[in-house]
Image (cartoon, rainbow, N blue to C red):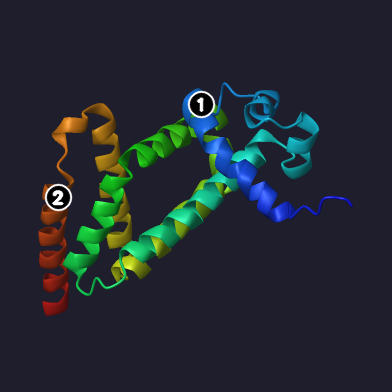
Amino acid sequence: MPKIVDHEQYRRELLSRCFDLFAEKGYGSLTMRQIAQGLGVSTGTLYHYFPSKEVLFEQLLEELTEQDIHTITSALKGADTLSDRLAAAFAFLEENGDYFMKQTLILMDYYQQQGEAAIRESGFFKRMLDRARRAVAELLEVHDPDLEIFILSIIDGLTMQKLFDRDSVSIPKQTQILTEMLTLYLNSKSVS
């Protein structure tokens, strides 16, 4: 009897296994042949699911983004105040710091390989950033586009700082500072 394959599930499994390959080798230095070898599948199988390395990579990032949002949504359940939501979100980021640092490095390598013009033209990064902004708005219940970008910038900055000097960043302290800043900002907006 022929084996029944859930193609969507198999595609997702291939994607999840690719993350470590990209983290270890970088986007620019991997070929589809090397990815197939690393996954233990034929090149034909890989091309069946992903017509190019770029498509594979973009689908990987989309999948990771949705998984991250789902996971952090669960971590924020029961957090009623902005302070509680920020504390839970930043605790999640700290617990998964190595993963997010790898993700940042992979994104930077992809950006460098593709170039700014290609990145802007494809719209992929804009879609990912828009999805991240919507997640910040929903999860933190902050519905101010400038504030959403500010919070994402803080997260990105802390991740970069931890890449360069892991010991210099205290996530609980940064969470406290950000909470105080946002509270003052939001209070001043409500008074105006």
Around disc 1, counting alpha carbons within 10 Å, would you say few (fewer than 14), some (14 to 19), or many (20 or more)?
some
Of residue 147 and residue 97, the one placed in the foreground of this image is 97
> Which mark, residue 26?
1
Position above or below: 147 against 12? below
Q: Position of residue 4 (x, y in %)?
A: 80, 54
> Which mark, residue 123?
none
Residue at point 17%, 70% (across, down): 186
Position above or below: 187 against 30? below
Residue at point 80%, 33% (across, down): 44
**Secondary structure of residue under mark 2:** helix
Write down the residue under mark 2.
172
Q: Is residue 140 visible?
A: yes
Of residue 25 and residue 17, the one placed in the foreground of this image is 17
Position above or below: 48 against 186? above
Instruction: Kindly identify the amino acid type of the residue bearing the numbered disc 2.
Output: Pro
Q: Position of residue 23 (x, y in %)?
A: 47, 30
